[in-house]
Image (cartoon, helix red, strand yellow):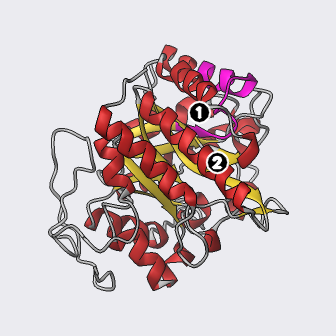
Amino acid sequence: MKNHHLLLAAGLSASSTFAVPYQTYRTRSTSATNSSIPVPPLNSLAKAAGLTYFGTAIDNPDLENPEYVQYAFGYAPELFGQVTPANGQKWDATEPEQNVFNYTEGDAIIDPALNDSMIARCHNLNWYNQNPAWLTSGNFTNATLISILENHIANIIGHYRGQCYAWDVVNEALNDNGTYRSDLWYDTIGPAFIPIAFRAAAQADPHAKLYYNDYNIEYAGAKASAAQALVQDLQAQGVRIDGVGLQSHFIGNETPSYDAQVANLQAFTALGVEVALTELDVRIPVPATDADQAQQAASYAESVQACVDVAGCVGVTVWDFDDQYSWVPGTFPGFGSADLFAANFTAKPAVASIASVLSAAAATGSAKL
């Protein structure tokens, strides 16, 4: 088992290409593949199936549990090959006071991930939520708020430059009816805050993939169409956008069908951007029955299969992997059990269903659609 209590400092080495983070760490905690992994190696299977990664979100309180840390990092990069800090890179964590930056929470997740040959999807630079009081109550002018946004992005990406495969630059800027969300950014700056954020991000790290990330854009409808129009608008302005993140927070018996997900993913990739499932979980009623878990397993499998089959879908991130750390019960009363593992780190049927999809694709080769 790998010991993650003693993580070594990073040594920087630039590279001319950027398929994975171009910082080279001096060592991994263990150089050999961990043969004791107790579940299917989902990231290894995903890469064999043609994806870039299969990964997980991780939140800082999770790191207090040694068994959790073993699953998150100790079996890397075989089980999970990518991480997303669930909260540690958001504005309230990184700039709690104006122009005073704190990278402690983000570093606590990014450093061990890169040390164990994982890649990072970094999250996020602009959102309507989890903003500090100084920002939300500042009554800033248009020009001042633009300056604050650009400064924040320059500092945050500057700190993580070269460590992030991708950044969720703007998160959840749209309403479900396809209109812009009324929030601090839109109400003060107007829709121009989005290209401003993307331009600032591109300048801060020309190698990182720049994403728009949102929920309820996983199937055709007003919101998905608006997200596609947003991509086209940025492109028309000459603003770089490399990808769209489809969060994929699903309900077991209401998950979009495989065909619907494939068609929707293709609608985005047709615009010349890559796509990823960035926050996948499947909530079911609690207490969950065997039938609920079977439905959940089928839903997970269909979503992963859709990504595997669509050219330009690069990877899947689950929104944490163990039920004891899921956000779902506190947000959706009566629902839970949304993750791949039960609260005692017992793999659910969904783990086997995902592994089956990935193994079949690796064995036969996925005919990319």
Question: Quadrant where the C terminus lies?
Answer: top left
- Quadrant housing residue 336: bottom right
Residue 343: x and y in percent read 61, 75
Residue to which mark 1 is pinned: 194
Residue located 19% across and 64% down the image: 25
Residue 291: x and y in percent read 72, 55
Q: Is residue 214 magenta?
A: yes
Which residue occupies the foreground of this view, 347 or 174?
347
| Amino acid found under the numbered disc labelled 2 | Trp
Which residue occupies the foreground of this view, 79 or 346?
346
| Amino acid found under the numbered disc labelled 1 | Ile
> How busy is the neighbourhood of tag 2: few (under 14 within 10 Å), some, or many (20 plus)?
many
- Quadrant housing residue 119: bottom left
Q: Residue 127: which numbered mark, if any?
A: 2
| Residue at disc 2, secondary structure | loop
Task: Report the span colored magenta.
Answer: 212-229
